[in-house]
């Protein structure tokens, strides 16, 4: 774990063994929260997707298919999870397949929360984004991608600039998106491996821009990262609205009819949130 060790303040001088103990307690930086501080957003162990809203707000499918997105529960040995696809295989033209759920508690302006999620790429090609929104359901459905603030992205699509994404996990920056990094090897992280679960901790600072907020750091365990590893520091909120964060939001896209991206799904499990910096497992 990349957690900076607390430094002892100048006031903690050598007075006596008992006084040192008291000062160490009072002067140290608080430790990260315990694992029992996690609040479940969804573990997907129920019989239905209770609390989630699905909306296909740019449904241009041909032939026209009502409610084309595939967002449903699936089971594996001793576990249940959710898979999300913009449409069934072979059907294109669903440009905004939104799925969202209210957070169990809001993240107020000035607060820091850690979000934990597990993801698994069904297959590439695909185009997925997920993260946190400070918008109402009506505005989420109107704004689509612009309803996001902290955002993670999984895609191997080609951009309009000609850049071809490679399937690495991505974050939002002021200049677009960036792959997360393998800092130890001074390079971009490798593409996500299909069929493999990844643990992701997203530390979200919802303070104002003036106070250094509207940003987030990302840690990953999985694939090339055998241990929990800091993979991006200082990613930026998409719009920086400086409002309470209130919804977990997912979006995916088949691409246009002329150049479809592909309908590979993204699988989600164990969505949690905790106040402060919490780099434990839920």
Image (tube, rainbow, N blue to C red):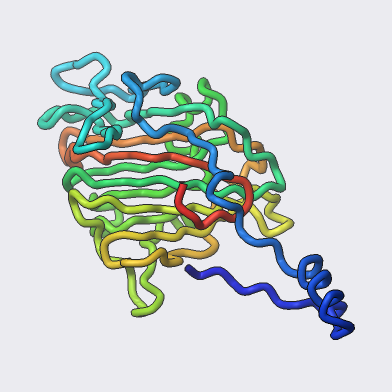
Which residue is at a point 44% across and 34% down the rendered structure image? 249
- Name the residue nearer the viewer: 30 or 171: 30
Question: Which one is nearer the viewer's eye here, 282 or 113?
Answer: 282
Residue 47 vs residue 15: left or right? Answer: left
Please state the horizontal and vertical placement of residue 183, each as a whole percent of the image.
Answer: 40, 75
Above or below 167: residue 39: above
Q: Of 227 and 60, which appears nearest the observer?
A: 227
Q: Can residue 168 be seen in this view?
A: yes
Q: In this view, does 180 lie above or below 250?
A: below
Image position of 24 (left or right of 200)? right
Q: Residue at x 20, y 23 (%)?
A: 61
Q: Can residue 238 be seen in this view?
A: no
Give the total of numbered labels.
0
Residue at the location (70% across, 61% down)?
A: 30
Outermost residue to the left: 90
Q: In the figure, 20 relative to 282: above or below?
A: below
Q: Where is residue 75 in the image (x, y as percent from the top left)?
A: 22, 32
In this view, the residue farthest toward the bottom is 14
Q: Left or right: where does residue 16 sit relative to residue 135? A: right
Q: Nearer the viewer, residue 59 or 198?
A: 198
> Which residue: 48% across, 31% down?
143
Percent coordinates x, y for residue 117 in the rendering = 41, 45
- Residue 262, image x and y in percent? 17, 40
């Amino acid at each position: 774990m990349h957690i900076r060790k607390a430094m002892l303040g100048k006031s903690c001088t050598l007075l006596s063994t008992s006084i040192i103990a008291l000062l160490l307690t009072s002067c140290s930086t608080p430790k990260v929260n315990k694992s029992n501080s996690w609040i479940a957003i969804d573990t997907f162990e129920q019989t239905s997707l209770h609390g989630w809203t699905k909306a296909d707000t740019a449904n241009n499918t041909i032939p026209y298919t009502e409610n084309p997105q595939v967002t449903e529960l699936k089971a594996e040995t001793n576990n249940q999870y959710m898979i999300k696809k913009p449409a069934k295989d072979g059907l294109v033209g669903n440009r905004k397949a939104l799925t969202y759920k209210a957070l169990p508690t809001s993240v107020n302006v000035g607060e820091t929360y850690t979000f934990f999620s597990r993801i698994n790429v069904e297959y590439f090609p695909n185009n997925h984004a997920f993260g946190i929104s400070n918008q109402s359901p009506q505005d989420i459905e109107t704004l689509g991608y612009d309803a996001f603030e902290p955002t993670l992205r999984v895609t191997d699509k080609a951009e309009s600039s000609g850049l071809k994404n490679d399937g690495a996990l991505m974050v939002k920056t002021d200049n677009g998106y960036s792959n997360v990094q393998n800092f130890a090897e001074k390079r971009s992280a490798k593409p996500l491996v299909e069929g493999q679960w990844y643990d992701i901790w997203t530390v979200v600072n919802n303070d104002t821009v003036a106070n250094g907020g509207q940003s987030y750091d990302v840690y990953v365990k999985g694939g090339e990262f055998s241990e929990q590893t800091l993979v991006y520091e200082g990613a930026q909120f998409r719009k920086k609205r400086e409002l309470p964060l209130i919804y977990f939001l997912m979006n995916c896209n088949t691409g246009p009819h002329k150049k479809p991206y592909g309908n590979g799904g993204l699988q989600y499990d164990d969505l949690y949130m905790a106040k402060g910096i919490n780099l434990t497992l839920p």
